[in-house]
Amino acid sequence: MPIIFHEEQRIFHLTNKYVSYIIRVMENDQLENLYYGKRIHDREDFANLHETCWRSQMSIVMPDPSNLSMQYARQEYPFYGTGDYRAPAATVLQKNGSRVVDFKLDSFSIRPGKPELPGLPATYIESIDEADTLEITLVDKLSGTELVLSYTIYEDYPVITRHARFLQVGDDPVVLERALSMSVEFLDMDYEMVQLSGAWGRERYVHTRKLDMGIQSIQGLAGTTGGAEQNPFAALKRKETTEQAGEVYGFSLVYSGNFLAQVEVSTFDMTRVTMGIHPENFAWKLEKGETFVTPEVVMVYSDKGMNGMSQVYHRLYRTRLAHGEWRDKERPILLNNWEGTYFDFTEEKLLAMARKAKEVGIELFVLDDGWFGTRNDDYRGLGDWFCNMEKLPSGINGLSEKMEEIGVKFGLWFELEMVNKDSDLYRAHPDWIIHVPGRYHCQARHQHVLDYSRPEVVDYIHDMVAKILSESKISYIKWDMNRYMTAPFSLALPADRQGEMMHRYTLGLYNLYSRLTSEFPHVLFESCASGGARFDPGLLYFAPQAWCSDDTDASERCKIQYGTTYVYPVSMIGAHVSAVPNHQLHRTTPLATRANVAMFGTFGYELDLEKMPEEEIQVVKEQIRFMKKYRRLIQIESDFYRLLSPFKGNETGWICVSPDKKTALAGFYQRLNKVNASWIRFKLAGLYEDVKYKLSYRVCDETRGYAAYGDELMSVGIPIDREDLTALGGDFASIVFEISAE
Ligand code: DGJ
C-alpha cells in the first residue's frame, strides 16, 4: 500500500519506488507538508522534520507548550488570516464579510484506485491497483464549509496528482474567491524555475530563471489556458540539473481556462509552489449542498534530469490522460489544404489535391477553414456550420464520399466556440456572444466568443456538428479557436455569479468535447488555437493531437517542438511539411529538413502537391514510406530524449528509443551553415552501453553508416561531417539516423 498512516504521530506517507510525500497533522489539527522528493524509507515518526523555533513577532495559533505558529509552518493548503503572510491556496468569503477560516482535520480515507473529477478531464487508471488515493477532509466549523484534499499516487510512476473539493454544509452561502488545486513547500530556494513561454508563431520556448525572494509566477487570463504566451506548466530544477541528470519537480495543470502557477520564496528561503484556476475574475458561490471541484495538478519528481521528468509526462499523458480509440493508434499521414489554398478552393481543386495525395501515400485529406456558410474570408460565416453549396456542390456528404472513393479518409475544420457578426447564427442569437451589455464588443479576427457557460448554446452547436458527422464520412476533426476572451460576462448568470462565468465556459467546452468524442469515437480530434495557443493537458484528454504552431518553418519548429516536449508526448504534436519560401518567415529550408522535423510529430503536409516538381514528389513519396515504417516507434512506442538545445546553440538534436533499446531514430538539425568551423560530435542517449548498433543515414542519394557500441554513440558521439551538411543544403541542413541493435 503506497499510502501509510502513522496513527500515533498522525503522519501520512505517500510513497512508491520513486517518491515520498509526507504530511503531518499539526497540534491544531491543520496539515503541514513535511517532505516531498526522492523516496525515503518509511518510519513511525517523522515529526522531527517539523522545524520550529521562537522568532520575533511570531503569531501563535496555539499557546504553550506547542507555541504553534502558521507563519513559518509549511501549510499543506494555506489560508490567509492566521499568521501565514504568504499567498494562500484558497480564500473563502463568508456572510459576515470575513475571509478568516480555520480548516481542521475531520476525517480521511485511503482507498485503492483514483476517482474521476466530475466534468473535468483528469489522468485515469485502467486497473484499480495502478494507484491509491488519500482524501483528507477538513472542516471550517464557523462557516460550515468542508474541504477535501485529494492525493493520488501512481504505483509505477513518480507521480502524485492533486485536486481540492469544497462542499458547503452550513446554511449560509460562501464565495470561493480563490480555489487553487494545490500547494507544496520546499525548505530552501536553491532552484531555477522553468516555464514554457512565447507568443503566436513562437510558442512554448524554454525559459529558466533563478528563484528570488518574493513572488514569481506565470498566468493565463485569456480564457484559453495561457494562450500562446504561457503554458500551464512550471518546473523547479536544481542549478546543476541538465537534460540527462539531476533533480526536477514538474507541475502541470490539467485545465484549459485561466490559470496561475506561482512560486513564492519567503525571506527564510522557503519555496511555496501553488497552481490552479487564476483568482482574477473568479468567484464561485457555494450555496448549501453545492460542491466545487478544482482541476487536477500532475506533479512529477525526477532525479534523472529534464528528460527524466518529460518521459514520465509523455508516458502518463499518452496512456493515462489521452483516451479513446486513437490513443494507441499510429496517426494517419494527412494533407491539410490551408497553406495550399487558404480560402480559395473549389470542389474540383480539392479532389485534384486528394488524388495527388493518394498517389504519394497520404491517408487523410483535411479540409480546413472556408467550407461553410458564406466563409470566403475571415470576416464572416463562423457559426453557420452548413456547407457552402456554391463552393462545394456535392455538399460535405458528397465530398466525403468522393474522397473515400479516391482512397483517402476525410477530415473537416471547425471553430465551434466562435461566431462572426456576419452570420445567420449571430443574427438569430445576438445575445449568445460573451459581452457586457452597454459596452463595446471587442472583436479579434472579426469574431466573437460564444457563451459556452450557457448549456443551450453548447446544445445548439452540438446538434449542428453531430448532424454533419452523422450524415457524412468524417474521420477527423480539427477544432480551432482563434481569439482570446474579452469582457467576460454572461447574460444568463445573476450578478453574484458572474465570477463563475469563465470556469463555466471551460466546463461547457469540456461538455461539448465529451459528448462529441463519445458519440463519434472513431473520429480523430486535433485541437488547435491560432496554432498552439491552447496546447494543454485538459484538451489532450479529448483530442490526442494538437496543432503545435502556425509557424511551419522547419528551423523555428525545432525550437517550438523541443520546448513542447518538456511536457507533451510526440504523438500530440501536430507537425506538417509546408511550402517554401515559408509563408510565415519567407525562409527556404530543404525539403528533407522540413520532413525530418515534422516526422517527430503527427506528420503531414500542408501545401499544394500539384505545384511541386516531379523530383520533389518522388522525395515526398520516400518520406511518407519512411514515416510509415517508423511512426509506431516515434508516436507510440518510444522514449523521447532531447539531446541538443536550439535555445543554447546552432544545433538541435533528439532521439526516440524503443523500450527494448534495440531500435532508435535520432534527428540532428543545424541552423546556419558555418565555414572552416569546429568539429561536431552528436552524442546520443537512451541506448545500451554494451550493445553494438548499426547506424545508417542518408546524405543526398547516398546511404552511409557504420556500427558502434552504445557507449561510443553516447559518450563519444557521432562525428558530423560539415561537408555533408553543406551537401544537404548548408543552412538548415539535417540528418536522421536510423539505429538498430546488431
Ligand atoms: C488558425 C489555424 O492555426 C490554422 O492552421 C488554420 O486552420 C486557420 N486558423 C484557419 O482559419
Image: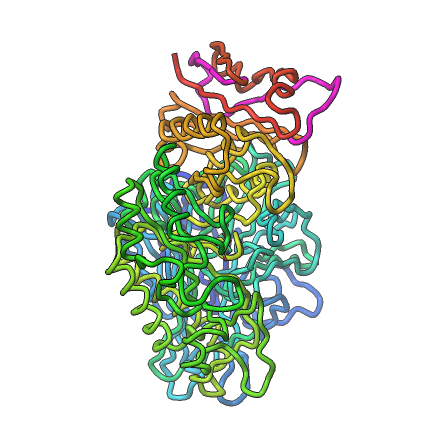
Q: Is residue 103 left or right of residue 476?
A: right
Front-most of 594 and 48? 594
Q: Is residue 463 above or below residue 622?
A: below
Q: Is residue 706 magenta?
A: no
Front-most of 452 and 429? 429
Front-most of 376 and 319? 376
Q: Is residue 595 visible?
A: yes
Total numbered circles: 0
Q: Position of residue 224 (x, y in %)?
A: 51, 63
- Residue 679, by quadrant, is top right
Q: Is residue 58 above or below residue 614?
A: below
Find the magenta span and give its range.
671-699
Q: Is residue 173 left or right of residue 282?
A: left
Q: Position of residue 197 (x, y in %)?
A: 61, 51
Q: Position of residue 415 (x, y in %)?
A: 44, 62
Q: Is residue 695 magenta?
A: yes
